[in-house]
Image (cartoon, rainbow, N blue to C red):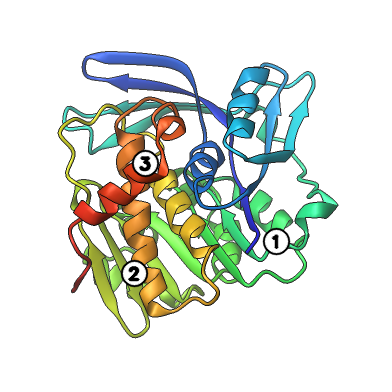
């Protein structure tokens, strides 16, 4: 099943208690594409400025990512994000966000992408997500992600996105911010009322929680000896999930649960490196080993 990702490709500056990483390749679509590429050929839709190095695009192409939808806009700078992590690396705050090329970006979906059956609207401006949805013929499954910045500043457009999607991925604090519900199952049910039929709440080191109209189930995180950088872990999680689902002839409850496990494993690789360097260096054997060692999905 063809898989399209629409999102940001960015320069990230990461502030940690004992480390500063400046201008590392990042962005939701970058991490998603790297993780999903182990399962299918990913179609990437994003915009960068003329400051984006060609070798960053080449790294994605080496992973088999279709970059025909990665638009380079001359005279513009690439989207830039700066985040600061707390001591435990669980909590982070956005220190600076420069939309740059995205401020006036009008997405034009390549004709060869219009038949995409599986679509992931990675974290990005809701108006861009909506514009892309208008250009896709008849997708079978549309999943979206968002962040606190858009919940606060682009809520009206975000509500329009939620009304048009099948699934939503969101982290714990964002689910609370969007719904006002502190209890996560209650927050998930409130999000279902906005349009999606499945909500996946990402809970960091506690794993993830999937909520549908009929079920609530959880997936523990993969235990790691060392965590280097949490940036992009949620997008890698989504890439693993949708990459796996793209291989399935039909989307059953069992396939959704296994997708949750695959996403958890791909996120664990992301956590072990900076940018997509660790994701770009793994092989199928490592993925299978971690899946075998992963704590089982449990009913909640």
Crowdedness near tag 1: few (<14), some (14–19) or many (≥20) residues, C-alpha within 10 Å: some
Residue 116 got which mark?
1
Residue marked by disc 2: 257
Nearer the observer, 41 or 235: 41
Left or right for 190, reference 2: left
SS of the residue under disc 1: loop
Classify 135 as above or below 29: below
* Residue 50 visible, this angle: yes
Q: Quadrant of the N terminus?
A: bottom right
Seen as rendered, the residue at the extreme right is 111
Q: CA distance from mark 1 to mark 3?
A: 24 Å
Nearer the observer, 197 or 178: 197
Of callouts 1 and 3, which one flags the residue occurring earlier in the amino acid sequence? 1
Crowdedness near tag 2: few (<14), some (14–19) or many (≥20) residues, C-alpha within 10 Å: some
Residue 178: image x %, image y %? 39, 59
Residue drawn 42% across the image and 72% down it:
198
Residue drawn 37% across the image and 34% down it:
231
Seen as rendered, the residue at the extreme bottom is 214
Left or right for 58, reference 192: right
Residue 3: image x %, image y %? 62, 56
Of callouts 2 and 3, which one flags the residue occurring earlier in the amino acid sequence? 3
Residue marked by disc 3: 233
Q: Quadrant of residue 172?
A: bottom left
* Residue 191 visible, this angle: no
SS of the residue under disc 2: helix
Q: CA distance from mark 2 to mark 1?
A: 23 Å
């Amino acid at each position: 099943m063809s898989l399209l990702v629409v999102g940001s490709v960015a320069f990230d500056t990461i502030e940690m208690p004992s480390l500063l990483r400046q201008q590392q390749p990042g962005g939701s679509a970058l991490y998603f594409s790297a993780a999903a590429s182990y399962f299918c050929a990913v179609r990437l839709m994003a915009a960068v400025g003329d400051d984006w190095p060609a070798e960053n695009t080449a790294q994605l192409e080496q992973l088999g990512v279709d970059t025909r939808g990665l638009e380079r806009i001359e005279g513009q700078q690439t989207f830039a994000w700066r985040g600061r992590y707390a001591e435990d690396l669980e909590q982070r705050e956005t220190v600076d966000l420069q939309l740059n090329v995205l401020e006036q970006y009008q997405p034009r979906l390549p004709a060869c992408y219009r038949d995409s059956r599986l679509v992931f609207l990675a974290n990005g401006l809701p108006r861009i997500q909506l514009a892309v949805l208008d250009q896709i013929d008849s997708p079978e499954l549309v999943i979206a992600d968002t962040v606190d910045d858009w919940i606060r500043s682009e809520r009206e457009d975000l509500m329009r996105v939620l009304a048009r999607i099948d699934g939503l991925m969101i982290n714990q604090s964002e689910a609370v911010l969007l719904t006002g519900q502190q209890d996560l199952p209650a927050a998930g049910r409130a999000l279902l009322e906005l349009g999606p039929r499945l909500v996946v709440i990402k809970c960091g080191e506690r794993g993830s929680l999937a909520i549908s109209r009929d079920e609530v189930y959880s997936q523990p995180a993969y235990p790691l000896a060392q965590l280097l950088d949490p940036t992009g872990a949620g997008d890698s999680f989504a890439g693993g999930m949708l990459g796996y689902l793209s291989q399935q002839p039909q989307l059953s409850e069992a396939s959704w649960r296994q997708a949750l496990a695959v996403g958890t494993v791909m996120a664990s690789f992301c956590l072990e490196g900076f940018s997509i360097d660790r994701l770009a260096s793994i092989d199928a054997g490592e993925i299978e080993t971690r899946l075998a060692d992963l704590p089982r999905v449990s009913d909640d």
